[in-house]
């Protein structure tokens, strides 16, 4: 799981408190002024994950109505990570939280913040309520907010990591198998050479055998995804290159009981 690399001594934390101090000196203590400092801090944290803080964003509430949030954290895969709501020191933060939830604000991962206090709800439960006048407490609350993963996202990330590792291992084994078959399987040798010539004529006259092998491997590993997960059984019949690759794959798997058995 990705972790937030943030310490009380880091520059974004120091800048946050410096900005708050400057706003107070200038008499700018309303929500619109002081939330700028926290927005800068959130943005600095987002950069570690390639996420984006979208301020003043409209989203759908749990009551199917549009609501305006101070900040929406969006992941690089367009999934929503969390919501930020800012208040000033004069607001009763606990009461403001109740008001927001009464309007249908989601409770999956939301941080309510004032210059002196933070309340965090995750998975429908309040998980944090504390003062952030000290850098250590501020960092603790931000790590909790940024490192949270709802079960469905955590399971997806775990599956994606495991899938990536398996694909890498399968790819290496397929390279060894293809190179072996190019020496012993006459039908595959003929099909591979024929497909290589097609590639050199239609794609690149200088394409290497290694690049052709890579095309075959990618096709082997993705064809079932298109066919099963995306319910597209016609993929290999409608794509011209895929049709030619299929001929080579059929030759490669001809000595197996079936393609599934081969894979």
Image (tube, grey):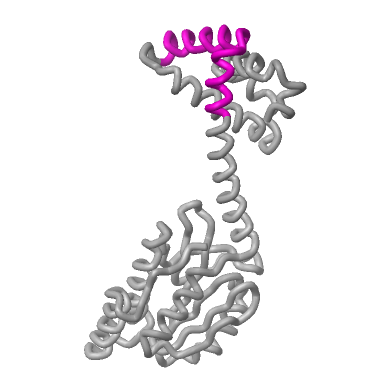
Eyeballing the image, is 250 above or below 59?
Answer: above
> Mostly what secondary structure, the magenta segment?
helix
Locate the C terminus by quadrant.
top right
Closer to the camera in the image, 36 or 142:
142
Residue shown at 53% from the left, 56% from the top: 79
Where are the magenta residues, as a range? 174-203
Residue shown at 71% from the left, 24% from the top: 259
Closer to the camera in the image, 59 or 170:
170
Residue shown at 54% from the left, 89% from the top: 94
Closer to the camera in the image, 6 or 114:
6
Looking at the image, can residue 68 be seen? Answer: no
Eyeballing the image, is 235 above or below 81?
Answer: above
Residue shown at 63% from the left, 72% from the top: 123
Q: Residue 210's quadrant in the figure? A: top left
Q: Residue 5 appears at what percent x and percent y?
A: 39, 69
Looking at the image, can residue 83 be seen? Answer: yes
Closer to the camera in the image, 68 or 186:
186
Eyeballing the image, is 194 above or below 141?
Answer: above
Q: How many marks?
A: 0
Q: Residue 252 appears at what percent x and percent y?
A: 63, 18
Q: Residue 197: within the magenta?
A: yes
Q: Residue 99: within the magenta?
A: no
């Amino acid at each position: 799981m990705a972790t937030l690399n943030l310490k009380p001594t880091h520059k974004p934390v120091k800048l946050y408190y410096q900005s708050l101090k400057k706003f107070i000196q200038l008499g700018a203590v309303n929500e619109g002024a002081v939330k700028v400092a926290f927005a800068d801090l959130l943005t600095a944290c987002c950069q570690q994950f390639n996420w984006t803080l979208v301020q003043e964003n409209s989203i759908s509430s749990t009551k199917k109505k549009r609501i305006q949030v101070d900040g929406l954290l969006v992941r690089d895969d367009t999934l929503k990570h969390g919501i930020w709501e800012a208040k000033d020191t004069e607001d009763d933060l606990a009461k403001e939280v109740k008001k927001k939830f009464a309007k249908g604000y989601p409770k999956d991962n939301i941080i309510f913040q004032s210059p002196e206090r933070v309340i965090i709800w995750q998975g429908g439960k309040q998980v944090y309520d504390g003062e952030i006048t000290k850098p250590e407490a501020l960092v603790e609350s931000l790590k909790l907010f940024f490192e949270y993963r709802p079960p469905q996202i955590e399971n997806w990330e775990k599956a994606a990591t495991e899938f990536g590792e398996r694909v890498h291992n399968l790819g290496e084994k397929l390279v060894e198998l293809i190179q072996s078959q190019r020496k012993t399987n006459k039908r595959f040798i003929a099909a591979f050479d024929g497909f290589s010539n097609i590639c050199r004529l239609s794609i690149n006259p200088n394409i290497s055998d290694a690049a052709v092998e890579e095309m075959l491997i990618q096709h082997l590993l993705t064809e079932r995804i298109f066919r099963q997960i995306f319910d597209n059984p016609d993929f290999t019949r409608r794509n011209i290159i895929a049709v030619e690759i299929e001929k080579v794959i059929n030759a490669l798997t001809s000595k197996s009981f079936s393609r599934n058995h081969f894979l």
